[in-house]
Amino acid sequence: MFVEELKEKQGKILYYQAGTELSPLVDAYHKKEMEILISQSPLDSHFFTFLERKIEGLEFKRIDSSID
């Protein structure tokens, strides 16, 4: 399962809230061989929160915010 593989590899699912252009951050993470989910809708963040509540251990983090 894709989600399980990402959790094992990265610990959390990283995503970027895309506007009209992709951030250089996306390229930087790809160069580190990290998967980034590109979110196109502002509603996606609400859906991610819903999934975090439903699936134990699932965590989404925006790459353009603090990911510590």
Image: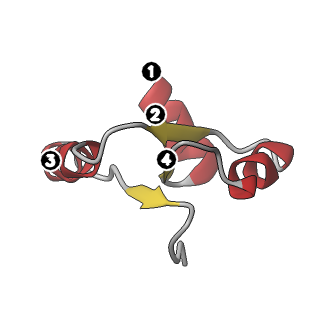
- Local packing at callout 2 (Cα closer than 10 Å; few below 14, some 14-19, many 20+) is few
Q: Quadrant of residue 8?
A: top right
Q: Secondary structure at mark 4?
A: loop
- Residue receiving disc 1: 1
Between discs 4 and 1, the one toward the N terminus: 1
Which residue in the protein does label 2 denote?
A: 4
In the rendered structure, find residue 50 and report the number of the disc placed on it: 3
Q: Tell me whether circle 2 and circle 1 mark residues in contact (CB < 8 Å).
A: yes
Whether residues under marks 1 and 3 lie with C-beta atoms below 8 angstroms apart, the answer is no
The three-letter amino acid code for the residue at tag 1 is Met
Cα–Cα gap, marks 4 and 1: 28 Å
As drawn, which residue projects farthest toward the front? 20
Contact between marks 2 and 4 (CB within 8 A): the answer is: no
- In 3D space, how far apart are the residues under numbered discs 4 and 3 (Cα atoms)? 22 Å
Which structural element holds mark 2? helix
Find residue 13 and report its horizontal and vertical position in percent: 48, 48
